[in-house]
Image (tube, rainbow, N blue to C red):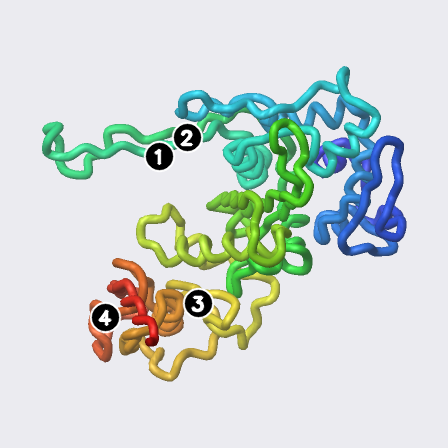
């Protein structure tokens, strides 16, 4: 899609045939899980249509398709501070076979690492500029080194690698990925009050150099929030066994859970003041602070229907004793508190304690203990 938009090989109204969900090409047959009569590029990305994306990708020459993949960092090490980093695999067009261009459009005939995927999506988040990834954001020293506790001794400065796409193309791609979460295969990753841009990926696993029958990898890459992103998340699940193997039902919900936890955590690097302006198009005057589909761990200036005790600048801490972690966190979020979690299992108590009042947006520490195992019946 990046190459098509950059080279202006596609317009928003262009449509390609869905071929009834099955399209035979020399060397391979391409199928869709959700057949449709026709697709725009946005449709193909939104519903993850193999046929649609292959047909649009055919508008690129092999050298052009290879160049855009290479520009995004695939096939080369990222340079991250990690020993023996894998470079992945991206073969040049000179050794492609007849179905290679179609296979690459669907994510086959190449191997990539999760950090390469994160780096590529980071380029979309950074308005088209590819940045060198790092494992270390900053190093802080303490009294042992002779400095004041918490003194920053090193802070990473982003290192641009190159511009991959223009600012306008990056914004257009984020909008396409936003449609995946709002109306496509990524709806399980949606949050109520923040827009997310993402893409699902489901592919057959490679075992001993061959695609293994009946084995799959589910992946999900997300930008949060969709406008002016601050986080890139990449989730990869090898060979999911329970229920569906599709990323829409496996990796997408995991991503959503991770985003909820990031919003609730105190030590995640988020500009929360900037997040307060990230209002999704769906938000209206009656949007609740939270429903069953999402949470917001701090107050934002949007109208909502509050919990009966969530009024004024101070509010009562709810009693969450005995609830599971997820339910307890959501109950605290619904009152407008941020949550710091200590332990796991079932909620034991909070600080401030249940019934005490605390300022809206303040942190409530939730203490949890493992649930004791049930004794077997005799």
Residue drawn 31% across the image and 33% down it: 138
Checking the image for residue 137, the label placed there is 1
Residue drawn 52% across the image and 67% down it: 293
Could one spot residue 37 in this view of the protein? yes
Residue drawn 76% across the image and 35% down it: 4
Q: Which residue is mark 4?
A: 349
Q: Reading the chain from its start, which is encountered first: label 4 or label 3?
A: 3
**Are circles 2 and 1 on residues that touch, CB within 8 Å?**
yes
How far apart marks 1 and 3 lie (CA) works out to: 31 Å
Q: Quadrant of the N terminus?
A: top right
Q: Position of residue 284 (x, y in %)?
A: 57, 71
Front position in the image: 303 or 4: 4
Callout 4 crowding tier (Cα within 10 Å): few <14, some 14–19, many ≥20: some
Q: Secondary structure at mark 3?
A: loop
Q: Which residue is mark 2?
A: 134
How far apart marks 4 and 3 lie (CA) works out to: 29 Å
Q: Secondary structure at mark 1?
A: loop
Checking the image for residue 160, the label placed there is none
Q: Which residue is mark 3?
A: 301
Q: Residue furthest bottom?
A: 308
Q: Reading the chain from its start, which is encountered first: label 1 or label 3?
A: 1
């Amino acid at each position: 899609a990046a190459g098509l938009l950059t080279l202006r090989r596609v317009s928003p109204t262009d449509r390609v045939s869905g071929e009834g969900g099955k399209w035979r090409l020399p060397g391979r047959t391409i199928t869709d899980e959700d057949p449709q009569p026709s697709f725009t590029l946005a449709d193909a990305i939104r519903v993850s249509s193999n046929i649609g994306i292959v047909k649009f990708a055919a508008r690129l020459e092999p050298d052009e398709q290879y160049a855009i993949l290479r520009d995004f960092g695939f096939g080369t090490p990222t340079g991250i501070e990690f020993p023996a980093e894998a470079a992945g695999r991206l073969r040049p067009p000179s050794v492609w076979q007849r179905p290679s261009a179609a296979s690459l459009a669907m994510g086959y005939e190449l191997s990539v690492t999760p950090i390469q995927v994160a780096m590529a999506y980071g380029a979309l988040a950074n308005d088209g500029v590819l940045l060198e990834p790092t494992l270390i954001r900053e190093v802080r020293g303490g009294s042992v080194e002779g400095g004041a506790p918490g003194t920053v001794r090193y802070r990473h400065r982003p290192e641009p690698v190159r511009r991959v796409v223009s600012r306008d193309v990056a914004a257009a791609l984020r909008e396409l990925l936003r449609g995946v979460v709002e109306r496509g295969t990524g709806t399980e990753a949606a949050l109520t009050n923040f827009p997310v841009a993402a893409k699902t990926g489901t592919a057959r696993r490679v075992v001993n150099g061959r695609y293994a029958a009946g084995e799959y990898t589910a992946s999900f890459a997300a930008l949060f929030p969709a406008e002016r992103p601050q986080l890139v998340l990449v989730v990869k699940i090898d060979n999911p066994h329970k229920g569906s193997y599709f990323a829409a039902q496996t990796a997408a919900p995991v991503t959503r859970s991770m985003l909820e936890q990031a919003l609730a955590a105190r030590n995640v690097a988020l500009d929360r003041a900037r997040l307060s302006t990230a209002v999704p198009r769906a938000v209206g005057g009656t949007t609740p602070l939270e429903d069953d589909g999402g949470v917001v761990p701090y107050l934002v200036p949007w109208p909502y229907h509050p919990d009966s005790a969530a009024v004024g600048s101070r509010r009562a801490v709810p009693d969450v004793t005995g609830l599971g972690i997820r339910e307890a966190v959501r109950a605290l979020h619904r009152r407008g508190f941020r949550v710091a979690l200590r332990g796991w299992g079932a909620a034991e108590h909070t600080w401030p304690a249940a019934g005490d009042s605390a300022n809206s947006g303040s942190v409530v520490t939730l203490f949890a203990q493992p649930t004791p195992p049930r004794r077997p019946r005799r």
